[in-house]
Amino acid sequence: MDDLATLIEAKSGGAPVSCDADAVRLRLGYDVASMRAAGHDPAIIREHEAFNERLGPFITHPQFGRYLADLTPSEVYGASGVGVLPLDGIREEVQELAPGGRLFPYGYMPFATSIGGNAICFHAPTGQVVWADHDSFGADEINYEDRDTGEYRFVSFTPEHIALAVVVLADDFFATLTDLVHDRLEATLDRLD
């Protein structure tokens, strides 16, 4: 693991962030205690509490949780033709942008993005690393190219349909991160972008 930290530091030009799980949760989520103290709308506070709860599987995952706490860069850096995101960038993706904000409630968290706005995501329930095309995930439906037939499908937004629309890159996060940082995924990601 130390070799990966050294590699990320060399690639990004700075030491990776190091913080505990509570700090990760606060940096990615919402400070509901402050919101409550400031008298914010209770309905909004409940929404933000639910968002914070969804962070749990990512923070507690043995590989991805370690990445979030000890290996995220302090600033975006390029690797394999994509930008690897710092915690603030991940937060923006899951709170405000597509596809990250659309996929986050289903257990996906972007950690890198392409120039075209597509995302490389970690899927907490399966431990897979996937490619998510931003054009595939609309407000109410998913459209994607069926890899078997080449036909475009327009389907409802469900976990099963998300799984059909994303492209699985790998089943091991640290192996994928190592390949990403060594620029071994550039050709694959270029084809997907």
Image (tube, rainbow, N blue to C red):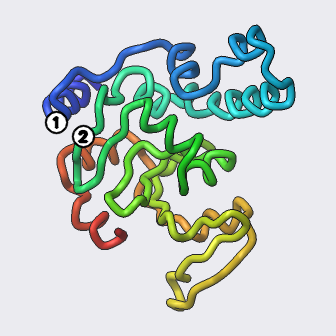
Where disc 1 sits, the SS reads helix
User: Observer-nearest residue: 103 or 163?
Assistant: 103
The residue that mark 1 highlights is 11
- The location of residue 87, given as percent across then percent down, is 43, 30
**Chain-order first, disc 1 or disc 2:** 1
The three-letter amino acid code for the residue at tag 2 is Tyr
Up the image or down, 81 lies above or below 178; here it is: below
Which residue was labeled with disc 2?
77
Out of 145 and 101, give the one closest to the viewer. 101
From the viewer's perspective, tell me whether residue 7 is left or right of residue 112: left
Q: Dot 2: what SS? A: strand
Q: Quadrant of residue 77?
A: top left
Q: Amino acid at mark 1?
A: Lys
Q: Which quarter of the image is occupied by the N terminus?
A: top left
Splitting the image into 4 quarters, where does residue 155 fall? Answer: bottom right
| Residue furthest top in the image | 37
Taking the image as shown, residue 80 lies to the left or right of residue 146, namely left
111, above or below 159, in the image? above
31 w.r.t. 108: above or below: above
Counting labels gives 2
Q: In the image, 82: left or right of 138?
A: left
Residue 24 on image: x %, y %: 51, 21
Report which quarter residue 89 is drawn in. top left
| Distance CA(mark 1)–CA(mark 2) | 7 Å
Check whether the beta carbons of the residues at disc 1 and disc 2 lie within 8 A of each other: yes
Residue drawn at (50%, 82%) of the image? 147
Question: Residue drawn 74% across and 12% down?
Answer: 38
